[in-house]
Image: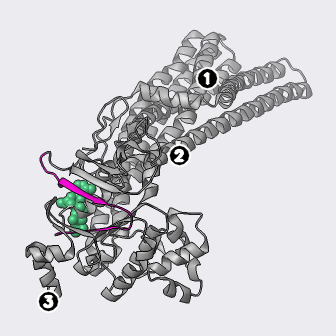
Amino acid sequence: MASDRTRTGRRIDIEFDGRYNIDVSRVDAGVLWRITAMAFRNRWRMTLGIVAALAAGFFQLFVPQFLGRAVDQAQGLLGAGISRDLAGEALMTTAMLLVATSVLRGLFAMVQNYQGESVGQIIGYDLRMAYYRQLQTLSLSWHDRVHSGELMTRGILDIEGVRLWVDTGILRCVLLSTLVVGGAILLVRIDLVLGLLALGFVPVIAVMASGARLRLRDAWLALQEELSQLTKVMEENLGGIRVVRAFASTAYEMMRYDTIAARALALSHRRIALFVRSSTRMTFIFLAAMGLVLWVGGEKAMAGEITLGQLAECLAFMAILQMPVRQIGWMINSVARASTCGGRLFNVLDLEPSIADHPDAGPLEVRDGVLRFEQVDFAYPASARDRRTLSNIEFEVGPGRTLGIVGPPGSGKSTIGQLVGRYYDVTAGRITIDGVDVRSVTLASLRRQVSIVPQQPFLFTAGIDHNVAYGDPWAGRAAIEHSAAAAQLHNYIRKLPTGYSTLVGERGVSLSGGQRQRLSIARGVLPDSAVIVFDDSTAAVDAATEQRIHEALHDLTRERAVIIIAHRLRSLLHADEIIFLEEGTIVERGSHEELLALEKRYRALWDLQASGGES
Ligand code: ATP
């Protein structure tokens, strides 16, 4: 389970596959209220939208009345033997009124749609920014648990679900209420029996439409789940495309993708079948109700109880009401969707990062730049309760000094680097810089003072110069070239046709592994940080180049505390102290000579490497 908690203290259940464990069948009024409140922050737009929806409904109610009047006028005028010209004039007047009413209805509907869509887009923008900001600040222990492909899909689809609530939910509700209530009053006023018959189809179709929509919503959710699985598979596959090719696993990956794609297709077919079945049934019921009204109304018209125009008015009302009544289903769907999507989004947005600035945190002010680990214990939040990654780690490294860390894979070396930058918090003990606990200063100021050159370099799809200057965007060309030269990369860049502006491709794909590592080193040493951690950052570089890098970096790191994590012991010859980690505990420590003299693990490893054996 993820470690970050909501502000209300409620723990969010995010399982290891990254799926949100949320009950989607429940409509959460609190969530809808929150989205509605977000919409009404755009007070003028919402007021305009609501007024326009009321006016559009109002003018639409005139259309059947004018139609009925036209029929009566035509019949009355012709029946009374009045000339064709006069009859034509009366009909023309009604037709003009009909056109004017329709134009007004159309204009107001346009304003309603525009305002609804624009408020929806504003909410979408606000949520997108808040979601992205939140993903930037949530702790790494949370990100360790959640699949990024899943987060990206949610960030797109859930925001869409919430956004549509304004238009298909709030404003359409106003329009529908106006039409249904106004239409019902007008129909019953013409003739009670005919009115009730004409309105009888409303609840039937409303219930059917809602049921169908909810079933469609479930099918939609299942489809989204499959689509998000597709994104996950594709994202992973593209990230590891070289591994896939290397193991000739294209066919297997295709099969994996195909299995999910086939499930998504089956779900789409289910949705289409549901949709077609329900809309056919609704059309049938509507036409049957119209036939009934025509039959009963016809009898009444022949008996002289109502005029032909009133019958035509009833039928026109029914035709007008048909669409909005069907849309009740859309509205209910929109409520359910907004509630589900909003719930999932707010659950992420409400999380409080477990690694955050303390309320009293101030900026880190570096005087001497001495880093100390004091009896540090650490366990990853996802680890079993009794499984510590680091135990009782103690060391001190100051400016101009170098600490080497060595140990078998998984012994906790990189974890030490992660703790220095406070990507995780220690479980016991403390880490200080100049005696100040790193938890008591702001994260931004701490991370400005701690550079980490990671084991696996990550490069952005940008030019070499932008990648080198990522930690200090104001760095001048001279500083960028100086860092690149120290990382033994300047000569290579110089020979490129576009030099420092050369694009490195997605994640630096156009560079070799060693070039990527050296570019990452250049980026790490550029900012003027007090502490710098090289996490096995020359593993892909040959021994001679590595030697030159260390010599060149000597100048750049003269006033910084340096930690070098390495498997190749030759990289640590110049270190002032070397610690040997095993299962998270320091088992040997001292200078290179002292450790050799101990004749234990370090010595054995050194002899093995010196003889050319594998470590
Ligand atoms: P290597 O030499 O292979 O890079 P290392 O000594 O740097 O290894 P670490 O990366 O610090 O080892 O990992 C120490 C232990 O912590 C390992 O057992 C690893 O599985 C575990 N670990 C590392 N990162 C995480 C994480 N994000 N969540 C849970 N456990 C982790």
Secondary structure at numbered mark 2:
helix
**Residue 22 location in percent, x, y?**
31, 37
Q: Which amino acid does label 3 sit on?
A: Ser
Image: 261 above or below 438? below
Secondary structure at numbered mark 1:
helix
Badge 3 or badge 2: first in the primary sequence? 2
**Residue 531 location in percent, x, y?**
39, 61
The residue closer to the viewer here, 505 or 301, is: 505
Q: For the magenta stretch, what is the residue range? A: 386-407
In the rendered image, which quarter contains the N terminus? top left
**Image mark for residue 179:** 1
Apparent side of residue 328 relative to residue 385 in the rendered image (left or right): right
Asked where in the image residue 79 lies, by quadrant, the reply is: top right
The residue closer to the viewer here, 564 or 189, is: 564
The residue closer to the viewer here, 146 or 26, is: 146
Instruction: Name the residue at the left extreme.
Output: 600
In the rendered image, which quarter contains the C terminus? bottom left
Badge 1 or badge 2: first in the primary sequence? 2
| Residue that badge 2 annotates | 129
Check if mark 3's residue and mark 2's residue have beta carbons within 8 Å. no
Q: Which residue is drawn at 28% across and 81% down?
A: 246
Asked where in the image residue 53 lies, by quadrant, the reply is: top right
Q: Which amino acid does label 2 sit on?
A: Met
| Residue that badge 3 annotates | 611
**Residue 11 visible within the image:** yes
Magenta-colored stretch includes residue 403: yes
**Residue 269 visible within the image:** no
Q: Residue at x 30, y 50 (%)?
A: 431
Question: Which of the four quarters of the rendered structure image does ligand 1 lie in?
Answer: bottom left
